[in-house]
Image (cartoon, grey):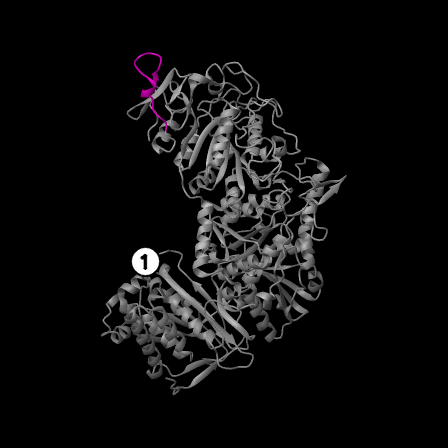
Amino acid sequence: MAVFEKPVEVLPEATVLFAGDSGDGMQLTGMQFARATALARNDLATLPDFPAEIRAPAGTTYGVSGYQLHFGSVPIRTPGDAVDMLVAMNPAALKVHLPRVRRGGTLLINVNAFDRRGLELARYETNPLEDGSLEGYQVIPIELTRLTRETLADSGLDKKEIDRCKNMFALGLVLWLYSRPLEPVEQWLAQKFASRPKIRDANLKVLHKGYHYGETHELFAVRYEVRPAHLEPGLYRAIRGVEALALGLIAASHQSGLPLFYGSYPITPASDLLHELSRHKNFGVMTFQAEDEIAAVGAALGASFGGALGVTATSGPGLSLKSETIGLAVMTELPLVVIDLQRGGPSTGLPTKTEQSDLLFALYGRHGEAPLPVLAASSPGDCFYAAYEACRIAVRYMTPVILLADGYLANGAEPWRVPDVASLPPFEVRFATEPNFHQNGEARFLPYRRDPETLARAWARPGTPGLEHRVGGLEKEDETGNVSYDPANHQRMVKLRAEKVARVAREIPPTEIFGDPEGDVLLIGWGSTRGAIEAAVEHLRDRGLRVGSIHLRYLNPLPPDLPEIFDRYHHLVVPELNNGQLVRVLRDAYLRPFVPLNKIQGLPFQAREIETFITELTQA
Amino acid sequence: MSDAKRPEENTPRGTRPVMPPGAKPAMPPKARPAMPPGAKPAMPPRARPAMPPGTSPTGDGKPRLTRKDFASDQDVRWCPGCGDYAILATVQRLLPDLGVPRENIVFISGIGCSSRFPYYMNTYGMHSIHGRAPAIATGLKASRPELDVWIITGDGDALSIGGNHLIHILRRNLNVQILLFNNQIYGLTKGQYSPTSEEGKVTKSSPYGSIDHPFNPVALALGADATFVARSMDRDTKHLQEMLRRAHDHRGAAFVEIYQNCNIFNDGAFFQFTERDTKPHRTLFLEHGKPLVFDEGRKGIRLDGLQPEVIDLTDDRWSVDDCLVYDETNRELAHLMARIFFHPELPQPFGVFYREKRPTYEDLLHHQIAEVTARKGKGDLQTLLRSGDTWVIEPEPAEVTP
């Protein structure tokens, strides 16, 4: 098959976007291309883009489904700012995604879909293939539908089944264009359609047809190659953020010996975590689909009271509904992990779009003095470690913890080096089993006696004889946990609960700096913006600016070493996908002129947006 | 299911005069004050005949616990004369009899006067958030099925702010006891009408009379497919104890509505059912397999079609044989009885309205986990992390192994 007659151009990196109707199988096509790319040892990042509607009418712009993939021999940090090649299966896909294609980029277009009906559905008044609007792009018109039908004319499949195979033509062609092997897709097709040999053979035939089309057709003067990246050796798998969160929770349960109880109410995009966890019952995972958000977190807290690892996850409005119970967890000092997959707000906002606008709510969104640790995950794979750490902190300090992720992290995927279980941080749990207070020959259990190091109170599970006690939302007397209205006691308890959370800072590892350890600009980020920020830092350094970045895993408490890092830069810039939240927290904590860089469009940062901002800032 | 027909509407309106909070009730004088804790018990704890006194009913030879063992060291802070005292005492007397190790008992409450209950019990407990006790108890019971979980709630807690959780715990059928202290008023917030207050009720928040239609808690529980539904009252501790014992014996969510007098804000709300002068002819005690008779055997209930009607057993026309024989496993009968609700002519039913056997949520949950584990094998974390499409990056550039 390897007929390398045409010249091969070597690229350091490339971004491809497959787009078509919801029914065109674009997610599948994209995933198979990603898999072939991973097996070719490229670094990569992917971003699926589903329509918000469940079953949007075929051919319309709101029914367009896309899968973007950025891969390279260099480190890949984002799914790509600008698309090098768009595969558009219909006019709507072209209309929606053309703005993402770089000038001079390639448009691989299924021209058969550009009939009157298709153009009307996409609301094109004139045919973009004919009206000159695609000038400046390299247009490759292909009769995908016709070629697929021709290929399968004697396959015995009906027209509908035949048309469903046309994505394999596109896949075969793009695999040829980027010099990817066919074998991984062949193997996958053989497995997937093992019980339906007719369908399997049709797909294989069309896949090969697409591949050979590239080889033989004069439209393609050149093919590309992206060489293997320098990746840390090890076993890799592709992982989505939600999968990584689920695995992190299961790992925390496994390593701590605490059964995992996950309470959740369906909400976009957090529902996928419920789906994922409910598949793993053979790890003893208890999933509870509650009647509402409040019951979901309430049940998780009830399970924690019983000695389980109580976890809940939500998005947007769900976090508002959970805040009273999180306050109860602060008062009862029980471990509880609340994962917030942030989305555009306020109210219902932009349910399928990403945003970082819940930071202040996570930090302060409870009545009364109710501090708690807040953590954030920075990449799909990092969701694993962030979830594990959130559980560990919650149990070690007997506190609710909020873990912030977002829709972009949840749905995005990246190659993930599978960790050794033995390499995970230790996670020991000690339940109280004996009275912890002895006086005048009498032994008692004081539920609010604290560990002198962490200030965590004792955790006695119901069922432990002799340690019967009551917890609740009323203010607790120090040590005994009895209801107390004593003024001095209230002040002492507020301070104690705050100090306990502050002490988490003692185990925050030294902050790592990406790029220059001192210089003109320090970028301070958190959450899913890490890839874009670090890509921008690289590009800016290439242009001679001295730029570094730090990315905060711990948003409360903040790492203790930040001030001395801030001292080393002229400008302190805080890029966020919100209207300026971390920047307020930093100004409050450190009284320095932090500069906000905000994008609030429901979309992730592009590295070049950050680069432009920094360039203008340093030139001003 | 239509409401039992009666001359007026199907709400408690008009059953007793509306009065401002704190006014003297027009109902019969108090037969006896509500008891403070430690007052003479209305009933001795029922010892099981097979058990020698002083030993645990579990037969493990441990000293038998007493009521005192279940009282915490906290002062009980309900208003003197509150019906809650009698319920607390009844529960504390019953528990030693149930044979459950004290450390396995957990009381979960919401917010309200009744929800202070867990603080007074020397067991595990949580005084949680307004309305959310069923949600918290669900997580606890689902993850720790061996615990004996009691939910303490009130009419505002369970039926207003927590209505959603109540119906869902009932349909899921967790094996818990739900004690709803119904006093038809918000006590802790000092006297607003509640979701069980009768229409027209004058309170601080309804000076011209409440325009809210009240819930019928027993009918609501039946509507939510509860597997055990009973009603009792604070002033009949013998009956109350029996209902609580049966609720505990039931495997599933056991809902017990307890009429509880709030002597400060709603004194006498249930006196027609609880006081000596009116109780016999205003109440009907449902007993499984027995004919429905009341008023010390002078009256009975028969069905005229689907319509319950009172029959006089003292003349020759009717006899006990004409009375409806109650079957607490009959859902239709339960609905008929539940719909006799502050009826001016029919007596108010008390007792077990309904029970059925249905698998509990926690049993199903753990059964499913066991089944999946048996099928897929106990999960291995390292294998799970390595699952899916994997590939190896070798230290030196080399062939890729999928």
**Compared to B71, does A385 lie above or below?**
below
Q: Secondary structure at mark 1?
A: loop
Residue found farthest to the right: A440
**One can see residue A289 in this view:** yes
Secondary structure character of the magenta stretch overall = loop
Question: Is A502 in the magenta?
Answer: no
Graded by Cα atoms within 10 Å as few (under 14), some (14 to 19) or many (20 or more), the crowding at tag 1 reads some
Residue B100 picture location, percent across and down: 55, 38
Residue topped by disc 1? A57
Q: Which residues are magenta?
A: B309-326
Q: What's the residue type where badge 1 is placed?
A: Pro
Pick the front one: B232 or A567: B232
**Left or right, B8 with reference to B91:** left
Residue found farthest to the top: B315
Pick the front one: A548 or A310: A310
Question: Is B325 in the magenta?
Answer: yes
Pick the front one: B254 or A324: B254
* Residue visible at 45% across and 24% down in the picture: B198
**One can see residue A591 in this view:** no
Image quadrant for the C terminus of chain A? bottom right
